Image (cartoon, coloured by chain):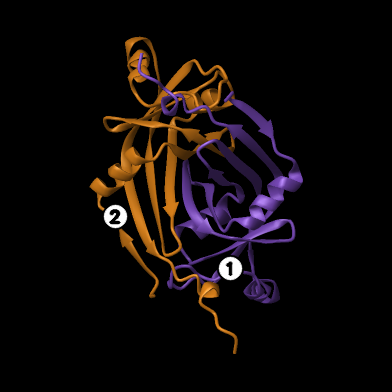
Chain colours: A purple, B orange
Amino acid sequence: MTGRVTEMTEADCWEMLRRHELGRLAFREGETVQITPLNYAVQGRSIVFRTAEGSKLSAIRDHNDVAFEIDETTDEAAMSVICRGRAVELTGEDAQMVDQLRLRPWVRTVKHHVVSIEIEEISGRFFMLTKPWLHMVPN
Amino acid sequence: MTGRVTEMTEADCWEMLRRHELGRLAFREGETVQITPLNYAVQGRSIVFRTAEGSKLSAIRDHNDVAFEIDETTDEAAMSVICRGRAVELTGEDAQMVDQLRLRPWVRTVKHHVVSIEIEEISGRFFMLTKPWLHMVPN
């Protein structure tokens, strides 16, 4: 098994984004970088998620340029999709439309705010894994 | 099934860090935030990874305050561990000691540099998932 990296097509990236529902958001909060897992859904060319009023929402208002990642692995391969975009809070009818998506709260805490990240860049990579320690034989 | 969130103990966070080998690093590159998956190993109170000379390494030299995340999910629960720390490049014997860890390149590209993140903060959360759409019955 040889290790190699292949760029995914944009269509494959979107397909993977639509298939998953848990990703990780990286954003700035003041001078620090934060990372958080979140439950999301795809709506058109955007990903949307719910959040409570709090430090995440206020950080995103200050620095709306964010990055988002999903990945999946098997014993033999890994795939990772990375997106960049600008986060905006949805209000009124736009926020209500999100009720139609498969974006129900996984955890029953109150999350009144809906944030949408319009994807400006998307790329994905497919890695054939070598994991040499799984293939070692005693000398 | 009720949705609830539990803080993980620090011992459980470290156990989960040691059990996994793929995480996501969030770091600053100029004014932007980047996120990337990476293969890592735990060494003492640090996580270490290999990287090639490139934009990731040069960004980390400029802003060494980084965040790192791992997670796992089942149908009923999700766990996520988030770490913060300072990334430093290891050289000489410190870098060579990393050869003893289960940190072999998954992908056979040349990665001469070893980076260590000394963990200053670690926290984890355990979420009981509700996923209501999996439990819906027709009206």
Is residue A8 found left or right of B51 in the rendered image? Answer: right
Verify CB contact (< 8 Å) between mark 1 and mark 2. no
Is residue B119 found left or right of B54 in the rendered image? Answer: left
Along the line of sight, the residue nearer the viewer: B68 or A1: A1
- Residue B130 against residue B8 in the figure, above or below: below
Asked whether residue A51 is in view, the answer is yes
Q: Residues within 10 Å of mark 1 (few under 14, many from 20)?
A: some
**Image quadrant in which you'd find residue A103:** bottom right
* Amino acid type of the residue that numbered disc 2 sits on in the rendered structure: Met
Q: What element does badge 2 sit on?
A: loop
Asked whether residue B33 is in view, the answer is no
Q: Residue furthest bottom?
A: B139
Looking at the picture, how far across and down is residue A60, in whole percent? 56, 54
Q: What element does badge 1 sit on?
A: loop
Tally the marks: 2
- Residue B38 against residue B82 in the figure, above or below: above
Along the line of sight, the residue nearer the viewer: B133 or A129: A129
Q: Mark 1 lies on which chain?
A: A
Q: Mark 2 lies on which chain?
A: B
Looking at the picture, how far across and down is residue B72, in whole percent? 43, 51
Q: Which quadrant does the N terminus of chain A fall into?
A: top right
Looking at the picture, how far across and down is residue A25, in whole percent? 54, 50
- Residue A5 against residue A99 in the figure, above or below: above
Along the line of sight, the residue nearer the viewer: B70 or B32: B70
Residue identifier under label 2: B8
* Amino acid type of the residue that numbered disc 1 sits on in the rendered structure: Leu
Q: Which residue is drawn at 49% across and 57% down?
A: A56
Residue identifier under label 1: A103
Is residue A111 found left or right of A98 in the rendered image? Answer: left
Looking at the picture, how far across and down is residue B133, in whole percent? 55, 74
**Image quadrant in which you'd find residue A91:** bottom right
Q: Which quadrant does the C terminus of chain A fall into?
A: top left
